[in-house]
Image (cartoon, helix red, strand yellow):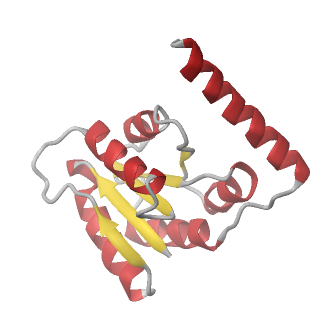
């Protein structure tokens, strides 16, 4: 799978660990930064990950900041992105199966490397179910997004 990973400075070390891990599993990984632990702003990396997913350079994204909250909020401002913080395996796969989540967000100050690897594995193994109820609900989410884009609110 083609994946994009990005993080702010707080998530840098975990991102590096996950990039290496995913490449050993045979995934094609686009690393959009940051490239050190020097302080940077998480919205820049949320936008970089989202952009790669939306323009087709990646099928899915993984985004990391200290708590996961700021990066998740920023990513979800971008139309077409469905990002969620997942610090448990159920959410990591269920978010894809039911909600067609396309960006997994992790908090590097909340979870450590081995759990992060398990979560990413769960996320990548999952596929959108296509069940009618989930398609219907996703259509409603997309309609909400479209309404607010059109109305300018």
Q: Quadrant of residue 130?
A: bottom right
Q: Quadrant of residue 148?
A: top right
Res 67 → quadrant: top left
Choose between 47 and 90: the one closer to the eye: 47
Give 90 or 29, whichever is nearer the viewer.
29
The image position of residue 34, as x and y in percent, is: 20, 55
Residue at x 43% of width, y 72% of height: 114
Q: Residue at x 48, y 67 (%)?
A: 115
- Give the total number of marks visible in the rendering: 0
Q: Position of residue 116 (x, y in %)?
A: 45, 65
Left or right of 94: which side holds 92? left
Report the residue at 27% width, 58% height from top: 32
Vertical arrangement, residue 138 with respect to residue 1, above or below: above
- Return the x and y of residue 26 as percentages of the image width and height: 44, 87
Q: Residue at x 67, y 53 (%)?
A: 100
Residue lying furthest left? 38
Q: Can residue 107 be seen in the rendering of this structure?
A: no
Choose between 137 and 40: the one closer to the eye.
Answer: 137
Residue 138 visible to an observer of this rendering: yes
The image shows residue 103 at horizontal and vertical percentages of 50, 53
Does residue 27 appear to the left or right of 42 in the view shown?
right
């Amino acid at each position: 799978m083609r994946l994009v990973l990005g993080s702010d400075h707080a998530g840098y070390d975990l991102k590096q660990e996950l990039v290496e891990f995913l490449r050993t599993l045979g995934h094609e990984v686009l690393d959009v930064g940051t490239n050190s632990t020097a302080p940077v702003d998480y919205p820049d990396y949320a936008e970089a990950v989202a952009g790669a997913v939306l323009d087709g350079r990646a099928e899915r994204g993984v985004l990391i900041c200290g708590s996961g909250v700021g990066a998740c909020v920023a990513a979800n401002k971008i139309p077409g992105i469905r990002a969620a913080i997942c610090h448990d395996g159920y959410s990591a796969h269920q978010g894809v199966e039911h909600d067609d989540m396309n960006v997994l967000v992790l908090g590097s100050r909340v979870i450590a490397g081995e759990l992060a690897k398990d979560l990413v594995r769960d996320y990548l193994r999952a596929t959108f179910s296509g069940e009618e109820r989930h398609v219907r609900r996703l259509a409603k989410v997309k309609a909400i997004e479209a309404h607010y884009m059109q109305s300018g609110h």
